[in-house]
Amino acid sequence: MITFVPEPRLLESPRGREWPVLPATRPATTPEPPPGADVVIVGAGPAGLAVASALWHHGVRDIVVVDRDGRPCGRFFDRVDLLGQRVLRSPYEHHPGVEGYRDCELLDFARLHWSVLTPVERREVRMAQAGHRSVVPVDVFEAYCTHLAASHHVTERTWRGSVREVLPTTQAVTVRADRFSVTARHAVLCLGEERRSAPDTWWGGGYPPRGVSYWDEPVPSGGKRLAVVGAGLTAAHLIATGLAQGREVRWIVREAGERYQCADVNSSFFRPEGRARFDGVSWSDRLALMGRFRRASIMFEFRPMLEAAEAEGRLVVHRGKAIAKVTPGVGLHLEDGTTVTADHAVLALGTTPSIGHGLMPDEAVLDRGGWPRLDERTFAYVGAPRVFAVGAAAGMALGPAARNIDGHRVATARVAAAVAENLRRDAPLRSAGKDVARV
């Protein structure tokens, strides 16, 4: 069997290029949003951007987007840049744009800006046009998201705020942030995922000991030896950055070996027949599928680089080794008795979906083993029908692809259609209520 391994040159796309910006790109003109709206979207990452853009095409323009960063996809790209990431794992057909409305899609955007692309990037565009796997530069994706936010008037409908509560009733949803509150007919939670914490047994719980940090924190520049714990793409980026800085890297992988694959989940789950595997399947079977297919893996492009570094001794990989204890200094004590020392250690232990815990009442979330109970047709919370989920939280309804950008678009299409239909159905009732109030 012949295995094709893409060239690592794809990982070196430029970052920070200037792209044309639509004149409509401007932030919200008031410090606080209006107190009422048709829809509140919590989170302005790729999922929130997709929802806002889709609602615009449905004629739903009275929206408020609340985001802790206050700019569409801001936190997403901050995290990307923290890792030194230059390309996305998602191909050109996976993007937050809206299908079926003659929108400019990601591949169209790249072709329109052909002169800005490098020869390697142009080759990827041709690969995408031919229906083959392609890799998208972060620069192109960010410029496209900026274009999408401007052309669908998302930027001017986005306010910075840390959401404290989401309080649903039978008639409305109130979203309370640190500085303001908004009451809307519907809310869409696009909360994304948060880093997975280390087990309490490693150092007794709480903040990591001296010399240890998580992947979404800056890595100190000093020190010759870096340790990375984790088996996914984030770990690969941390390793690549450490090697590029001339460090010796120690890589601890709990499983017997690292996994290289194109997508972060099996590609079949991006297609209707793959998503159908979750339809009518028992909860226990779904959990088994999620456990099997939602596993850490690395883009193929990293493989030649990491294998060469290991052969040269610049990278030492501890495969099949679990950590038993972490001590300041830095000492990573493995279960087999081995101790790995480093000047600094970074933990890339994966993520967990944010499903609404701490924001909504328990009876609204109806948590089942870390997953909310959702209507499988509309992705509305069964315990709060005016609140919807898009993103990783919809995993047990949509499948492993829910956390991927393409999964966002699939969920968005259903959610936007359901919200628009509900607003049309409620319109006569709202008008009658206004008439009664005037009398």
Image (spheres, helix red, strand yellow):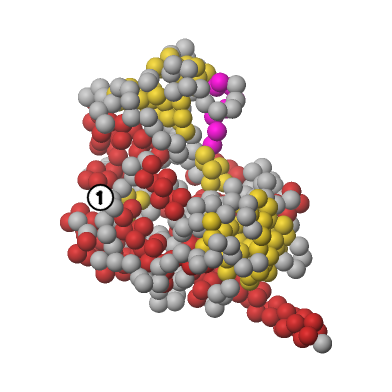
Q: Is residue 92 magenta?
A: no
Residue 130, position in %: x, y?
27, 64
Seen at 22% across and 65% down, the residue is: 114
Q: Is residue 200 magenta?
A: yes
For residue 376, what is the image quadrant?
bottom right
Judge whether residue 77 can be spotted in this image: yes
- Relative to the observer, which residue lies in front, 173 or 178? 178
Q: Amino acid at mark 1?
A: Ser
Q: What kind of element bears circle 1?
A: loop
Secondary structure mostly seen in magenta is loop
Seen at 74% across and 51% down, the residue is: 361
Q: Quick check: 165 left or right of 294?
A: right
Mark 1 lies on residue: 13
List the single residue furthest toward the left.
119
Seen at 22% across and 59% down, the residue is: 117
Residue 254, compared with residue 171, is above or below; it is: above
Seen at 72% across and 66% down, the residue is: 172
For residue 437, what is the image quadrant?
bottom right
Q: Quick check: 162 left or right of 383?
A: left
Residue 358, position in %: x, y?
68, 46
Specify the segment rendered in magenta. 196-203
Q: Quick check: 326 left or right of 313?
A: right
Residue 48, position in %: x, y?
52, 60
For residue 380, what is the image quadrant?
bottom right
- Assign the C terminus to one quadrant of the image: bottom right
Residue 424, compared with residue 327, is above or below; it is: below
